[in-house]
Image (cartoon, rainbow, N blue to C red):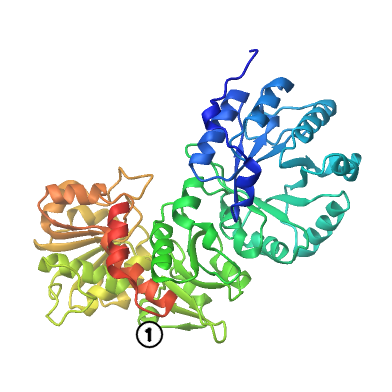
């Protein structure tokens, strides 16, 4: 391979000018086996919203200096050139000689690349100060990878940063393995107080908000992955560009998010973030993958974290994390929304699931659209047999809502003791889950699935046999990913009125948004947005 062809029409006249015109910096790490793939990935990164790329030279199967010259000279975005003796690439592990690393460093400086990233170990061996005197147009990023064991405290991180500053670094980069979302708090503290530009990368899916909240806490840049090449812990470039729009995030931005596990299915960010912007509210909504909800709320005590949606499986446990609980949520025994009261920082719990789900079912039965959650007519649920699958947080909301409308509530749950406890609370009836397919005391019953059965990625599942659905007038599914679950498809084929979890999602989100912003939600905007996205 003697030459590398790069389309000159794609060349940016001045990558450095492009660098200066954006804030915050959004960086795409480029890991490829060949220079040609790397060049095309730069073009792709630019189209997806990156304004700088990290060229991970250690991912290349071989390094030819002449081709590296071409890549840097004809890049279409500003760049960080990084090369390590021992590759951290997600591809096949490769080892480079120190001589090769230094040669790449020399070429990068000769071509005045915007940033050169070197490991702390190498930076300690060479004189960065001398390099900077000879080549003042390239800035040095000194990086350190902290992996294994317990995540470091803010004090330990502070000591590491101080050591790294002595190398002459212009920017410090810490790449840290995190096991829990609570491991991120010391990182946010360092981003806020560090006196030198700092890049923090939290490795793993629980570290996602480290990038999304980087601009709020003062991070030098954030990383985003190319579409089709997911990297755990990194948002996609397209989501940063279209959903989060980090250019609007600053130190005063209030943080909201979904506390759940799993969290990847959530459509909350594509609803709340545009709605914040539409309403002129300085907020950001992010997915928060939480394992221990009690520890999460014990750790995230800052007023910056102003409100939370609470999802599976934390809706019941989260009620014990609140300082105060709304009477409806207290009677249900589950919260799906928590607000940090600005005056004293206390956590106040609410449940917007109950009215959202019940009014969605009622309005479908009446054949009319939802109007402000208000209804003066008698509920069409009165006197109906209301069959509920699931006894978790969403199930409790449905059970209490159906009971309040005068329905006879019958609960099926794989954990029969949980079904019995909920049935006792609403004066209903609990039956073994295995009897669900045979349960048919009358026709025109109502079925509500409040379990996660049928949720992506297991969308081929249904909580009930198709043949049993003929006994139901209405079938409601809390699951909204996918929008048309197998349960709803089969119920429609059986002639039932079907109510998607999307409708419940919209309604509960409207209630949450009002609590988040202490004002009215842009209902028409939010409804249109969600229906377009699902």
> Can you identify the residue that label 1 sits on?
327
The residue under the point 51% across, 82% down is 341
Vertical side of 360 occupied by 130: above or below: above
Can you give x and y, in whole percent of width and height, for residue 478 in the image? Answer: 30, 60
Furthest-top residue in this view? 2
Image quadrant containing the N terminus: top right
> Quadrant location of residue 424?
bottom left
Rendered location of residue 56, percent (x, y) = 67, 34
Q: Quadrant of residue 156?
A: bottom right
Q: Nearer the viewer, residue 136 or 283?
A: 136
Image point 36% across, 72% down: which residue?
421
Of the pair 327 and 124, the residue shown nearer to us: 124
Residue furthest to the front in view is 13
Query: Tag 1's secondary structure?
Result: helix
In the picture, measured across the screen, residue 10 lies left or right of residue 100, that is: left
- Taking 494 as reference, is 60 left or right? right
The answer to whether residue 15 shows anywhere in this view is: yes
Residue placed at 62% from the left, 40% from the top?
14
Q: Nearer the viewer, residue 345 or 161?
A: 161
Instruction: Name the one closer to the observer, 7 or 516.
Output: 7
Q: How many marks?
A: 1
Q: Is residue 180 left or right of residue 423?
A: right
Where residue 66 appears, as percent x and y from the top left, is 71, 20
Residue drawn 84% across the image and 52% down it: 164
Q: Residues within 10 Å of mark 1 (few under 14, many from 20)?
A: few
Residue 442: percent from left, percent from top: 9, 63
Q: Is residue 290 visible?
A: no
Rendered view: 175 above or below 36: below
In this picture, residue 458 sits left or right of residue 370: right
Against 26, residue 503 (above or below) is: below
């Amino acid at each position: 391979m003697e030459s590398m062809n790069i389309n000159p029409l794609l060349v940016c006249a001045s990558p450095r000018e492009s660098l200066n015109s954006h804030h915050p910096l959004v960086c795409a790490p480029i890991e490829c086996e060949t220079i040609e793939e790397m060049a095309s990935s730069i073009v792709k990164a630019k189209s997806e919203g990156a304004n700088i790329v990290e060229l991970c030279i250690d991912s290349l199967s071989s390094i030819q200096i002449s081709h590296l010259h071409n890549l840097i000279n004809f890049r279409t975005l500003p760049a960080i050139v990084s090369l390590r003796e021992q590759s951290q690439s997600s591809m096949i592990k490769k080892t480079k000689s120190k001589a090769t690393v230094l040669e790449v460093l020399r070429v990068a400086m000769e071509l005045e690349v915007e940033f050169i990233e070197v490991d702390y170990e190498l930076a300690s061996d060479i004189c960065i100060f001398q390099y900077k005197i000879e080549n003042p147009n390239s800035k040095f990023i000194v990086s350190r990878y902290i992996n294994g064991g317990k995540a470091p405290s803010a004090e330990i991180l502070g000591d590491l940063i101080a050591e790294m500053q002595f190398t002459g670094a212009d920017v410090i980069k810490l790449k840290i393995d995190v096991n829990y979302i609570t491991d991120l708090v010391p990182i946010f503290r360092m981003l806020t107080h560090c006196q030198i530009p700092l890049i923090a990368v939290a490795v793993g899916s629980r570290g996602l908000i480290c990038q999304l909240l980087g601009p709020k806490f003062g991070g030098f840049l954030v990383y985003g992955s190319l579409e089709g090449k997911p990297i755990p812990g990194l948002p996609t470039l397209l989501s940063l560009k279209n959903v989060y729009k980090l250019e609007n995030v600053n130190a005063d931005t209030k943080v909201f998010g979904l506390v759940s596990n799993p969290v990847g299915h959530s459509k909350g960010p594509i609803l709340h973030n545009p709605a914040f912007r539409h309403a002129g509210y300085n907020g950001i909504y992010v997915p928060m993958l939480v394992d221990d909800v009690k520890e999460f709320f014990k750790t995230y005590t800052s007023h910056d974290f102003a409100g939370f949606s609470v999802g599976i499986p934390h809706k019941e446990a989260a009620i014990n994390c609140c300082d105060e609980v709304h009477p409806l949520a207290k009677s249900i025994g589950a919260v799906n929304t928590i607000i940090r009261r600005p005056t004293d920082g206390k956590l106040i719990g609410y449940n917007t699931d109950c009215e959202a789900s019940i009014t969605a079912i009622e309005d479908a039965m009446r054949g009319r659209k939802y109007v402000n959650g208000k209804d003066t007519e008698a509920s069409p649920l009165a006197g109906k047999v209301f069959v509920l699958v699931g006894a978790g947080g969403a199930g409790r909301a449905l059970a209490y809502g159906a009971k309040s409308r005068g329905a006879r509530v019958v609960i099926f749950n794989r954990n029969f003791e949980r079904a019995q406890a909920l049935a006792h609370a609403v004066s209903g009836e609990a039956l073994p889950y295995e009897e669900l397919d045979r349960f048919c005391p009358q026709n025109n019953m109502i079925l509500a699935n409040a379990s996660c059965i049928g949720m992506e990625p297991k969308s081929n599942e249904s909580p009930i046999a198709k043949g049993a659905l003929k006994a139901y007038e209405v079938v409601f599914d809390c699951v909204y990913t996918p929008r048309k679950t197998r349960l709803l498809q089969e119920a429609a084929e059986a002639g039932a009125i079907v109510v998607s979890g999307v409708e419940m999602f919209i309604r509960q989100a409207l209630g949450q948004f009002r609590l988040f912003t202490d004002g009215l939600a842009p209902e028409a905007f939010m409804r249109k947005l969600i229906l377009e996205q699902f």
